[in-house]
Image: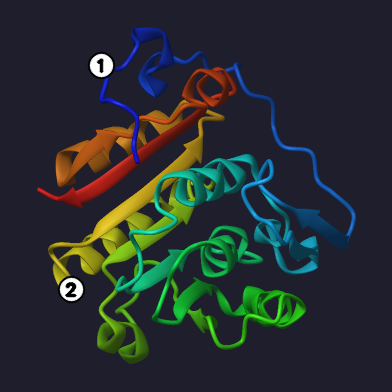
């Protein structure tokens, strides 16, 4: 159950965070890590991380934040949902939901073709073949037939704001998904690293109904430059 709604604290607005608040990320060596989201998963998730195919090959802070939020507040209300993760990388958020939430329909974790092997590997590593599928979804391109047929109504997107030239492509795909299913909700978490990220959020606010989500960890993750929203059709 979500905590009571409260008005955003001005100091936590991503539009007011200084450009130098968050340093550039530290890159990890390839390897397998175990994640239980602060005890929210009784059986930890195993994630192989490998940057050889791109920066999506490792876990990032927004993925941890969104994963914890979904496990804490949506463990029991996604049973009939059709769930898709965008820019999944290794599949951290989607696989956490597949393991820890009551979900009847197999969910999709999606990314570019370079990430497909890693997504498949992590599905197998966690024995989630019956609960999760890997698919290729390139932002800015027409949605694959497999996805339009699935018609997702819950979209997960964490740490997708990192490369400014891709912002229009990401916005186009988010818009396409909301046109495909106008009642869908996008759970969107990002870490503000540079000033351009503010422009992404401003454009999103013009295109969608953007709502900041309450979360008991918000005072902590906000100070780390992390922000958590839902996007819905305007």
How many neighbours does mark 1 have within 10 angstroms: few (below 14), some (14-19), or many (20 or more)? few
In percent of the image, x 51 and y 62: which residue is there? 97
In percent of the image, x 50 and y 22: which residue is there? 222
Instruction: For mark 2, give the secondary structure.
Output: helix
Quarter of the view holding residue 141? bottom left
Q: Is residue 195 above or below residue 49?
A: above
Q: Nearer the viewer, residue 95 or 216?
A: 216
**CA distance for labels 1 and 2:** 31 Å
Quarter of the view holding residue 125? bottom right
Instruction: For mark 1, give the secondary structure.
Output: loop
The picture places residue 199, in percent across and down from the top left corner, at 34, 33
- Is residue 73 rendered to the left or right of residue 207? right
Q: In which quadrant of the rendered image does the N terminus lie?
A: top left
Q: Closer to the camera: disc 1 or disc 2? A: 1
Q: Nearer the viewer, residue 177 or 95?
A: 95
Residue pushed farthest left?
A: 234
Mark sitting on residue 7: 1
The picture places residue 10, in percent across and down from the top left corner, at 34, 9
- Is residue 207 rendered to the left or right of residue 113? left
């Amino acid at each position: 159950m979500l905590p009571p709604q409260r008005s955003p604290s001005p100091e936590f607005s991503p539009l007011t965070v200084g450009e130098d608040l968050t340093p550039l990320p530290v890159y990890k060596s390839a390897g397998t890590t175990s994640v239980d989201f602060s005890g929210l998963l009784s059986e930890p998730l195993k994630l192989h991380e490998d940057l050889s195919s791109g920066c999506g090959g490792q876990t990032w802070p927004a993925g941890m934040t969104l994963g914890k939020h979904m496990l804490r507040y949506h463990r029991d209300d996604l049973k009939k949902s059709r769930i898709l993760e965008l820019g999944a990388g290794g599949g951290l958020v989607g696989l956490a939901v597949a393991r820890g939430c009551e979900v009847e329909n197999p969910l999709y974790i999606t990314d570019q073709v370079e990430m497909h092997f890693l997504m498949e590997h992590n599905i197998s590593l966690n024995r989630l073949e019956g609960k999760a599928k890997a698919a290729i979804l390139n932002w800015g391109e027409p949605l694959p037939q497999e996805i339009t047929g699935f018609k997702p109504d819950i979209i997960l997107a964490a740490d997708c704001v990192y490369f400014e030239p891709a912002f229009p492509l990401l916005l186009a795909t988010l818009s396409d998904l909301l046109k495909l299913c106008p009642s869908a909700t996008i759970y969107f978490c990002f870490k503000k690293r540079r000033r351009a990220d503010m422009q992404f959020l401003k454009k999103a606010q013009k295109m969608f109904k953007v709502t900041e989500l309450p979360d008991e960890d918000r005072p902590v993750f906000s100070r780390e430059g992390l922000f958590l929203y839902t996007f819905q059709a305007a």
